[in-house]
Amino acid sequence: MNASPERQVLKASRPGILLAGLACVLAAFLGIWFMGQTDDAVMIAWSGIGVFVLGAAALLALYQLWRPVRVILTPDGFAVTGLVRTGVVPWREVEAFLVYEEPMTEDGGVPPHAAWRLRDRSAAAEGLAARLNRAGGLPIDGSLPRNLGLSPEALVALLESWRARYGGL
């Protein structure tokens, strides 16, 4: 974590990325092994889809080892870099940072992570992530990765302190 009074950079953990990538590779090889253990065409097809998805995830992990996700905090706002970039979101356009989660149900769930909600009529609300989240009925406009070395609560507190300091509140 690089920090100065005017800039702070939070970076995804490379060991965590490496571990996730290795888990994907091992699971893909397990899927290939399962494919060789059966003559059932449906099982082979589903295993093939799983191997493809796990292989894509391993490639994504490899990319993130080279260019890890970073959250950059400056007096102007915050930005998320990596595979998907937010551009700079000005502090004054953020209504709040919060911990967002959805409890586990039959259909799945969302583990706790730091997220943000933008003010009404915010220019940043026209971004792709904000439009997709709102179209999906979510009460957030964007979210931050969980592998930045801080708990969701600590990350929200850090972001709120920057918003209070530079957002003109």
Image: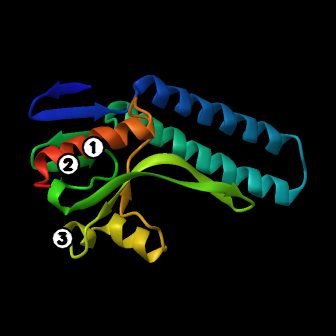
- Residue 35's disc number: none
- Circles 2, 1 touching at the beta carbon (< 8 Å): yes
Q: Label 3 neighbourhood size at 10 Å, few (<14), some (14-19), many (20+)? A: few
Identify residue type, mark 3.
Ala
Is 5 positioned to the left or the right of 30 in the image? left
Residue 90 appears anywhere in the view: no
Horizontal side of residue 126 vs 129, given as left or right: left
Label 1 sits on residue = 159
Furthest-top residue in view?
Answer: 15
Residue 49 seen in the figure: yes
Q: Is mark 1 on a helix, strand or loop?
A: helix
Question: Where does label 3 land, which residue?
Answer: 123
* C-alpha span from label 1 to label 3: 19 Å
Q: Name the residue under label 2.
A: 163
Q: Is residue 36 above or below residue 149?
A: below
Quadrant position of residue 142: bottom left
Quadrant in which the C terminus is drawn: bottom left
Asked whether 38 or 2 is in front, the reply is 2
Q: Comparing marks 2 and 3, which lies closer to the viewer?
A: 2
SS of the residue at dot 3?
helix
